[in-house]
């Protein structure tokens, strides 16, 4: 199983989508509420450092930890079962060389090993799908939390555009327009962690 299957992505694209979609939704609301929208006399802009949100927004830190642990548990489960199957296959080959089985016994054991291998592949696919669904839920929750906050935040600030800055996607941005700290502080203040639930450990058969 490849380790990168369960690597927790930073999800910068999700954050970028949230930051940009806020302005679009506000424009749509304004057009719906006003028959003849007034053309702004001044373009008021700002930008937010996406990387800072990913490392300083508590929601991101909490879910990154959750997903990382879940991914590690899945990987450990698969590796343990794969090692057990490999040991069984090695033992089978050793006994074959020693002529320890009849033909019927060898065929039965081989069929059982093949079934175990198929079951392992199915388990890996199922756990991988579950993990990806968990990531998708996180993406959606992150998008919603940022988007909803920006809608409220911008009622008073009234920015025309809020850019997302990630890496060098903005060739130049004056720090005077940087509202990252303000956004992170607001997001963390509004964030209410869900109660920690004790998960019942289930053994995959």
Image (spheres, rainbow, N blue to C red):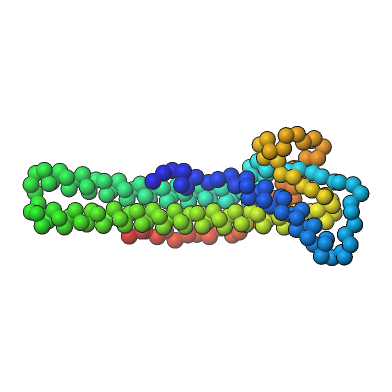
Residue 204 vs residue 110: left or right?
A: right
Q: Position of residue 92 (x, y in %)?
A: 17, 48
Q: Position of residue 110 (x, y in %)?
A: 19, 53
**How many numbered dots are placed on residues in this image?**
0
Residue 195 vs residue 93: left or right?
A: right
Rendering quarter of residue 33: bottom right
Q: Position of residue 113 (x, y in %)?
A: 23, 53
Image point 62% across, 57% down: which residue?
Answer: 141
Rendering quarter of residue 87: top left
Residue 175 vs residue 202: left or right?
A: right
Taking the view exactly as shown, the residue that stands out farthest to the front is 36
The answer to whether one can see residue 120 in this image is yes
Image point 42% across, 55% down: which residue?
Answer: 127
Foreground residue among 122 and 193: 122
The answer to whether one can see residue 56 in this image is no
Image point 83% across, 61% down: which residue?
Answer: 30
Rendering quarter of residue 26: bottom right
Q: Position of residue 152 (x, y in %)?
A: 78, 57
Foreground residue among 133 and 170: 170
Image point 65% across, 54% down: which residue?
Answer: 143
Foreground residue among 73 and 124: 124
The quadrant of the image that shows the C terminus is bottom left
């Amino acid at each position: 199983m490849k380790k990168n299957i369960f690597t927790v992505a930073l999800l910068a694209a999700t954050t970028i989508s949230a930051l940009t979609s806020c302005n679009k939704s506000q424009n749509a609301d304004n057009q719906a509420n006003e028959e003849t929208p007034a053309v702004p006399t001044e373009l008021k802009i700002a930008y937010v450092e996406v990387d800072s949100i990913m490392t300083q927004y508590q929601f991101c830190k909490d879910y990154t930890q959750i997903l990382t642990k879940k991914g590690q548990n899945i990987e450990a489960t698969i590796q343990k079962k794969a090692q057990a199957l490999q040991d069984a296959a090695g033992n089978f080959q050793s006994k074959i060389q020693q002529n320890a089985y009849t033909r019927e016994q060898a065929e039965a054991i081989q069929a059982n090993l093949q079934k175990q291998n198929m079951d392992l592949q199915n388990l890996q696919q199922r756990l991988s799908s579950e993990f990806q669904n968990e990531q998708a839920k996180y993406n959606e929750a992150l998008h919603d939390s940022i988007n909803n906050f920006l809608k409220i935040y911008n009622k008073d600030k009234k920015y025309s555009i809020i850019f997302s800055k990630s890496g060098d996607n903005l060739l130049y941005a004056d720090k005077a327009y940087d509202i990252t700290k303000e956004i992170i502080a607001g997001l963390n203040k509004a964030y209410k962690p869900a109660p920690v639930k004790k998960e019942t450990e289930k053994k995959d058969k």
